[in-house]
Image (cartoon, rainbow, N blue to C red):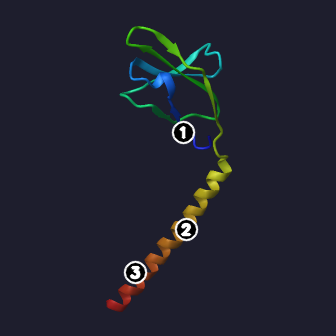
Amino acid sequence: MKEGYFTLNLTGTASDENYQQLEIEQSTDENFTQVESRFPFLGNFTQISLSGFNNGNYWFRARGQSSDGTEFTTAPIAVTVQHYPLWQALTLFSIGAVMFLIVASYILLAARKGGRRHG
């Protein structure tokens, strides 16, 4: 993922409406020796969008409980976040700044010429 955001889709048994207290757990290792964050599912949605992640590897799994008290955990999935390099972002920013200055200068010069004709 180059943008730092992604969407996790919950399908199959885990997306069944009979499950309650459904949440996504995040860890930095596949075995979930330490759960870094928990993201609760709100409502009956089967997707959750997550953002704000730094470069790195992340593991996610769903954990929930059925209405009869049976707990479940899905198989973990891996997500790798690798943002665009800083030089690329600064280059695009610089191009945008130059374009803005050109357009703003053109508008100011056109406004001055128009003001001299009518004034």
Disc 3 on helix, strand or loop?
helix
Residue 4 rendering spot, x and y as whole percentages: 57, 39
Residue 116 percent coordinates (x, y) = 37, 89
The quadrant in which the C terminus is found is bottom left
| Left or right for 26, reference 113 | right
Q: Is residue 41 above or below residue 34?
A: below
Quadrant in which residue 20 is drawn: top left
- Please state, as top left, top right, bottom left or bottom right, where the N terminus lies in the image: top right
Label 1 amino acid? Tyr
Q: Residue at x 60, y 63 (%)?
A: 95
Q: Which residue occupies the extreme top position in the image?
A: 69
- Does the residue at mark 3 contact the one at mark 1 (Cβ under 8 Å)? no
Relative placement, left or right, of 63 versus 111 is right
Q: Residue at x 58, y 57 (%)?
A: 93
Q: Which mark is residue 111?
A: 3
Of helix, strand and loop, which one carries label 1?
A: loop
- Residue 38 visible in the picture: no
Identify the element where label 2 is drawn. Answer: helix
Proximity of marks 3 and 2: CB atoms separated by less than 8 Å: no
100 up-or-down from 11: above or below: below
Image point (43%, 20%), residue name:
22
Q: x%, y% of residue 9?
A: 51, 32
For marks 2 and 1 on the same chain, the one whose residue lies earlier in the sequence: 1
Check disc 3 and give the amino acid type: Ala
Q: Residue at x 65, y 47 (%)?
A: 86
Residue on which disc 1 sits: 5
Q: CA distance from mark 2 to mark 1?
A: 28 Å
Badge 2 crowding class, 10 Å Cα cut-off, few under 14, some 14 to 19, many 20 or more, is: few
Side of 66 relative to 6 (left or right): left
Q: Which residue is mark 2?
A: 99
